[in-house]
Image: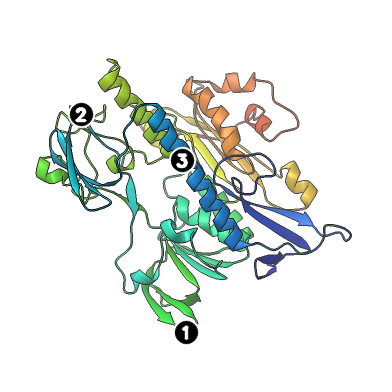
Amino acid sequence: MGKFYNGYSEEYGDVVEAWLTEIHNPEGKSGLVFEAKTQKITGGPGTERTYLNWKKLLHKKTEEIVRLNGIYKRLLSNAGVKLFEGEGRVIGPNQVELIQLDGTKISYSAKHILIATGSRAHRPAIPGQELAITSDEALSLEELPKRAVILGGGYISVEFASIWRGMGATVDLFFRKELPLRGFDDEMRTVVAKNLEGRGINLHPNTTLTELTKTEGGIKVRTDHGQEITADVVLFATGRAPNTKRLNLESVGVELDNRTGAVKVDEYSRTNIASIWAIGDVTNRMNLTPVALMEGTCFAKTVFGGQPTAADYNHIPCAVFCIPPLSVVGLSEEQALENSNGDILVFTSTFNPMKNTISGRQEKTMMKLVVDAESDKVLGASMCGPDAPEIMQGVAVALKCGATKAQFDSTIGIHPSAAEEFVTMRSATRRIPARKPKANI
């Protein structure tokens, strides 16, 4: 791979330009998502080396967060919501206590209490774990790390691996399984792993860290295979735990999950205490921001709208903002085989997108549809490639409406685009026989 120094990348004559799209956003896209693009050095104006100003980037990031927080506060105020800042806890079925910023305590009574305290980063209990950071601190580092070690194989780990590598750091990614992103479609996980390696990220599958030690040269990490690496920063991205420890819920009688500490709720987000409800990551159901919003809407309809509404967790799209991103909706191939009583048809398309052919980058996009052979219903869709989340949002609508493969095929594509591949995959890549015998009804 190319040589990296001081935020500058020299890779076969390419200059890597890195940014967070809500901070430096030439294409008008939204979302706090890291992207890296390449520009061929051809000589002449505009070919000077491009440097990343890390401190300015962090300053702009903080400005944006403050701006967004201000918007949310105004929305709450305009809706008539009273906001109290401090640490709260539940002290009765209808009572909460607030320790204000000045240390004074006040209590309030209410007919309903909603717990929405989210989750906190998990730290593995290994010697020297205090030397590592979590995602909470990753975008607040005073200096851009030149050498980064990341432990974990989920969303956060592959996203920060992409961010730091795109900015010029040497990145070593350690995870316990054979592939990152456990729970996603195995074929797509393989594509992501290949892309990460193709961009220069060092993958260490089936490996975990056992010890961190502070040295003059940085933080020395030791693995369970005896390997030692020295880094400037070590990021723990080993999952998040429901934020329930200091809420006093158990003393009130609210049931928590013994293993995770999550608040147990029914389909309407109600706990075993009739007046106490919970939504979002604190319940450890599907831990995505839009899902928490949906759960909040369902709670409001149920409690205040007179419309008992259960959250629907089917066909929820999601994305992993690695580079290039992965986005999925519906069932993976493995999930479809597990849940179906009939044969499964798998349609795939692998190609080099136009923006890569022009720039010269050899990085394939892959798209995939999983279809029930008997009903022709599309059970799942996946894509790894540029703009995958933007494309998958539209595909999610189709799956939510119960679209069939024939309906995909009859839809006219937009040309030239990557998205049109989803409506032009005519021939099945493979047919997989049913694993479950059909019920004899």
**Which quadrant of the view contains residue 38?**
bottom right
Indicate left or right for 78 with 91 as reference. Answer: right
Residue projecting furthest to the top:
306
Residue identified by numbered label 1: 216
| Residue under the point 45% across and 42% down | 69
Q: Bin the neighbour count of mark 1 within 10 Å (Cα to Cα): few under 14, some 14-19, many 20 and up.
A: few
- Between circles 1 and 3, the one closer to the viewer is 3
Question: In the rendered image of this protein, does residue 289 appear above or below residue 309?
Answer: below
Q: Secondary structure at mark 3?
A: helix
Q: Secondary structure at mark 1?
A: loop
Depth order, front residue of 163/142: 142
Residue identified by numbered label 3: 70
Indicate left or right for 333 with 271 as reference. Answer: right
Chain-order first, disc 1 or disc 2: 2
Indicate left or right for 145 with 36 as reference. Answer: left
Chain-order first, disc 2 or disc 3: 3
Depth order, front residue of 117/426: 117
